[in-house]
Amino acid sequence: MQPALAKRGPFWGGLFCALLFVALGCVFVTYTGLQEDEGAFAAPLYRDWSFYSVRLFHRQVPLMQMPYVGALKTWLYAPLAHVAAPSPAFIRIPVILVGAITILLFGALLDRVHGRRAAWTGCVLLSTDSIFLLTTTFDWGPVALQHLLLTAAMLFSVLWMQQGRNARLAAAGFACGLAFWDKAVFVWIFTGLLCGSLVFFRSIRKRLTASAAATAITSLAIAALPLLIYNASSTPRFYTFRSNSEFEVQNLGYKLDMLRRSWNGSGLFGYMVYESAASPGAPRNAVEKAGYAVHQYTGDRRTNLSGMALIFAVLLMPFLWRGRTRSTLLLLVIATGIAWLCMALSGGGGSVHHAVLLWPLPHLFMAVALAEASFHIRFGAWPLAAFVFFMGMANLAVTNQYLYQFVRNGPTPVWSNAIYGLAAAVREARVNQVVSVDWGIDVPLSVLNQDRPTVRIVADPILAPDAPPAQKKSELQLLSDPKTIWVDHTTASEVSPGIHERLVRAARSAGFDQQIMAIYSDRHGRPIFQAFRFIPHR
């Protein structure tokens, strides 16, 4: 992006911001239950079944979790699973560390692209970003490895441009290949970056030899090999691309609003944490009491100042047009815009965990624009420092609002901490298996109990008239098995409204009555889960 800068020492500000991020992330580790998508990567560590695997060394090795989500995270956690039992800390602390490494690489990238002022600006803004923090800590997207690999790919690309070493380009290609395997929708960001890099077409053409291009493509293909193997053997072929190739122009306004809510920090209120509670919780430790004290001073703070800052950075572009950062800023505007369009037009962008995949491109843009502008005014470092300080404080106020609402109101049903009580009860029960029909129960139980007893999910509706005879026979056996426990959400907490009533009605028509065994509530007293069995009509 820029000519090679003078050699300098390490950027310790990145380490400070990374440690701040770790501290903030660890505060939130225990406030929610394990969510279905968050724990999906860990399920193959404890059960035989996985979405797609290959036999290697007399074992089934998982390669893919879904048509577009790979098992890279599963591989990274596999060594940890041999030394630690599944728990909130086991699931979340490693990805918090991944986020911290992303911040370190982001600081190094900005230091290379522009300098220390930009590095400080970008790292402070990213490390205090509430959405970046929470979507990384509760990595249900998954997004943590996407951020890390995107940042690494950009850093190695810049190093290649500045140093001309093909090994740097190979590392960038390898990072992109891993990102494609981790989540194939990386193609959104990749496309945006390719389009944006055309701004540097002349410089790239001078540097990019046939050997360098071959090195980058080979490295990318090697890293993405599991994804390629799956698509070569799937039915139909190339199923990853077929399943994510829809063109959609509906709801663009809603998706743009979701991007805005993700950017201003408010996107997870109501989804992850309740907005109110019939029985409000009270602070129980020093951190929670401090959070309440801060909230008493600030009041409700559901949005930060990032929207204003981004508009300000965009308005600076005409004044910086003739400067050294023009091409860099233009690249970032094009890359972010194209990436979002690819996302929105291909069916994505309707949720926070999609929008946040654009991170840290907007932070990179703001950091470069604001830092460069500070060089054009007298004593510019001080206004920049004040601006960044207030931005960081506004971010932290939103983060504290999430903490306050987690303590006072608690997490929503799909994130409910009631899952831990349910898991403990199931673990102690002498049963052969646990069965559910609603979404969001089987993976958390399977992971938390290491699939002992085994957990399975059955189709809705059960005993459907058009179901194959073998399936009906299996479902009747489940209904009649006294060693099977059924688990569902209570009516008010159902993900699929009415699903439990459909199950009970089908069972009754087959000659079975429901017998409730226990109700499991969250820490605020809300009934979330129910365990039951079916007994023959008397």
Image: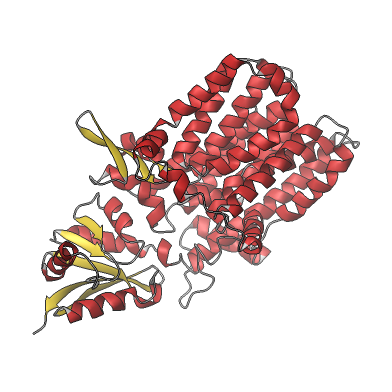
Q: Is residue 367 left or right of residue 265?
A: right
Q: Is residue 224 left or right of residue 169?
A: left
Q: Is residue 406 above or below residue 535?
A: above
x, y percent for residue 345: 60, 53
Q: Is residue 297 left or right of residue 491?
A: right
The residue furthest bottom is 538
Q: Is residue 209 above or below residue 383?
A: above
Residue at the image point whose x is 37% and y is 51% from the top: 39
The residue furthest front is 236
Residue at the image point whose x is 68% and y is 57% from the top: 304
Q: Quadrant location of the N terminus?
A: top right
x, y percent for residue 521: 34, 71
Residue at the image point whose x is 17% and y is 67% from the top: 472
Exactly how many numbered labels are in the figure?
0
The reply to whether residue 52 is visible in this rendering is: yes
The residue furthest left is 538
Quarter where residue 32 is shown: bottom left
* 208 or 530, nearer to the observer: 208
x, y percent for residue 482: 10, 68
The residue furthest right is 378
